[in-house]
Amino acid sequence: MYTNHDPAYSYMQDQVYRDQLIYELSLTADLIRAKNYFPTNPDLNTTTIIKDFFKIYSSRTQTDNTFGSGFHTAFWIYYIARLLDPELIVESGVWKGHTSWLLSQACPNARQYGFDKSLNHLEYNNLNVTMVEHDWQTYQFPDFDQNRALVFFDCHVNHAQRIIESKNKGFKHLLFDDNPPIHKLFSYIPGIPTAAMLYTGEGIEAPEIRWVWNGKEVIYPIDRDQAKQARELIKIHDLLPDVGGPTGYGGFTFLTYVQI
């Protein structure tokens, strides 16, 4: 029988060992912080952020987020949100509302929006989030500082399209989940072309991409003009280091920071 492993039930209770794990995670987190992708409060301590994350993540009221973000993705989303301290947060692909809840915990003063074609799966109630049951394409946001705004895409929509839309709407700090390079496409259909494909240029010159999923060939067309336009917008593409594997708290999902 399949059992959804939830790290909320398996944290070490001895503070010495928990601190050891937090220290190891802080070394990885500081590698990203040191790249200075956005201005951060120098008084904001990485260890403090991670301790806050453990406390919040283990207190979730809904612990089964199957098909949604696991520990690895949640860790980086929380950490980057705390560093950036955005005044505006947009999430495309809400699912059960787990990430919406996590972002609201990280940045309680931010204006937050969640978009999904269906909100029927929401399990988190009373979120301080404007939920919209359609795509974000035609939505007009109030004025915001692009240096203090964050968009998280977990909607399996063409990343080239999302990058162009983000640029047109004035966003620069993006997070993409499910962002494999072309040679690692498997078992599901992410937003193709992925940001990884756009960044390297691999796979975007062909008219289509083919791979096998569940024993069947998948053929996915590529809009080469759109892909080229999106590729030229990418300034930074950074696959965030795996923290789920080393901790045993959940799988790696190609979560990637993109700056345009």
Image: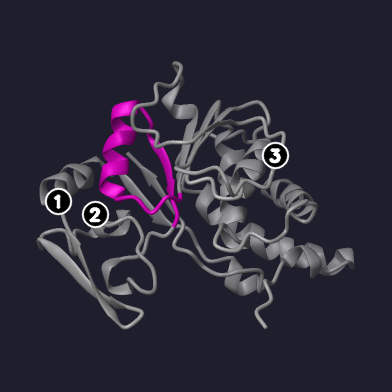
- Please name the amino acid that badge 2 sits on: Leu
What percent of the width, then of the height, locates residue 36?
47, 42
Which residue occupies 72% across, 34% down? 126
Residue 191 found in image quarter: bottom left
> How packed is label 2: few (under 14 Cα within 10 Å), some, or many (20 or more)?
many
Q: Residue furthest top?
A: 143
With 33 as the anchor, is 177 left or right in this view? left
Residue that mark 2 sits on: 198
Does dot 2 land on a helix, a strand or a loop?
helix
Q: From the image, which quarter does the C terminus lie in?
A: top left
What percent of the width, then of the height, locates residue 117?
44, 42
With 3 as the anchor, is 157 left or right in this view? left
C-alpha distance separating marks 2 and 1:
12 Å
Residue range (magenta)? 154-177
Which residue occupies 38% across, 31% down? 171
With 209 as the anchor, is 28 left or right in this view? right
> How packed is label 1: few (under 14 Cα within 10 Å), some, or many (20 or more)?
some
- Please name the amino acid that badge 3 sits on: Gln
Which residue occupies 55% across, 50% down? 95
What percent of the width, then of the height, locates residue 239?
42, 59
In the image, residue 54 sits, relative to residue 106, either above or below, namely below
Q: Is residue 158 magenta?
A: yes
Mark sitting earlier along the chain (2/1):
2
Q: Is residue 190 magenta?
A: no
Q: Residue furthest front?
A: 120
Check whether the beta carbons of the residues at disc 3 and disc 1 lie within 8 A of each other. no
Q: From the image, which quarter does the N terminus lie in?
A: bottom right
Mark sitting earlier along the chain (3/2):
3
Residue that mark 3 sits on: 105
Residue that mark 1 sits on: 223
What percent of the width, then of the height, locates residue 224?
12, 51
